[in-house]
Image: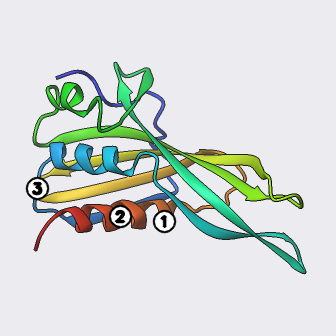
Amino acid sequence: MKKRIYHRFPLDNVEFTQKYHFWDDLPYIVKTFAGMNNKSGSFKINKSKNQALKAKRNMAVDIAESNVDFKQLTTNNLSSILKDIESNGILDFKIRLLYSYLGNNLNRIPTKGDTFLVRSDLNGGILTLQVHMIDGPGLTTCDEIADTIVDEISKGHPD
């Protein structure tokens, strides 16, 4: 198994940690994260007290590679990545949210995005998600990232 634990993941001051009962394995989690890559949605940005902008949020997902870097995780490279994934253990991901909004001339204007590190630790049917923001204005919170991950895991698994 390749090392997929990022060496700079914060150990002491992680912003969000939650445990979940989990019915599947790490390859299923990797497939879920790959499916989240390039998803987008709308939300509101408060530009000032009286003005809210309708913005777009686009998600990019990376998986830790050799402990020191990240590699983009897509459905196209999923099969090669899954070869190295065991059923239990720890995997680290980086989620980048790219934001944009429509300007006065209806042209899309990009703004600074948020970047999060996500650690998934699966052991004995318990999935522990740790989410830590490493960069950005904080338009999305760590618990919103965890909620999105759990929602995507639930959508893909028939119960």
Instruction: Determine the residue positioned at 23% across, 57% down.
Output: 127
Determine whether the residue tagged by mark 1 lies in a helix, strand or loop.
helix
Whether residues under marks 2 and 1 lie with C-beta atoms below 8 angstroms apart, the answer is yes
User: Is residue 81 shown left or right of residue 55?
Assistant: left
Which callout, 2 or 1, points to the residue nearer the camera? Answer: 1
Distance between mark 2 and mark 1 Cα atoms: 9 Å
Chain-order first, disc 2 or disc 3: 2
Residue that label 2 marks: 18
Instruction: Determine the residue positioned at 11% across, 59% down.
Output: 125
Determine whether the residue tagged by mark 3 lies in a helix, strand or loop.
loop
Tally of numbered discs: 3
User: Is residue 114 shown left or right of residue 129?
Assistant: right
Kind of residue at badge 2: Gln
Kind of residue at badge 3: Asp
Chain-order first, disc 3 or disc 1: 3
In percent of width and height, residue 116 lies at 53, 46
Direction bottom: furthest residue: 50
In percent of width and height, residue 39 lies at 46, 53
- Residue 91 makes an appearance in the image: yes
Camera-side residue of 76 and 27: 76
Kind of residue at badge 1: Asp
Which callout, 3 or 1, points to the residue nearer the camera? Answer: 3
Residue that label 3 marks: 24
Direction front: furthest residue: 105
In percent of width and height, residue 62 lies at 42, 35
Which callout, 2 or 3, points to the residue nearer the camera? Answer: 3
Distance between mark 3 and mark 1 Cα atoms: 22 Å
- Residue 13 makes an appearance in the image: no
User: Is residue 152 shown left or right of residue 58?
Assistant: left
Determine whether the residue tagged by mark 2 lies in a helix, strand or loop.
strand
Distance between mark 2 and mark 3 Cα atoms: 17 Å
Residue that label 1 marks: 143
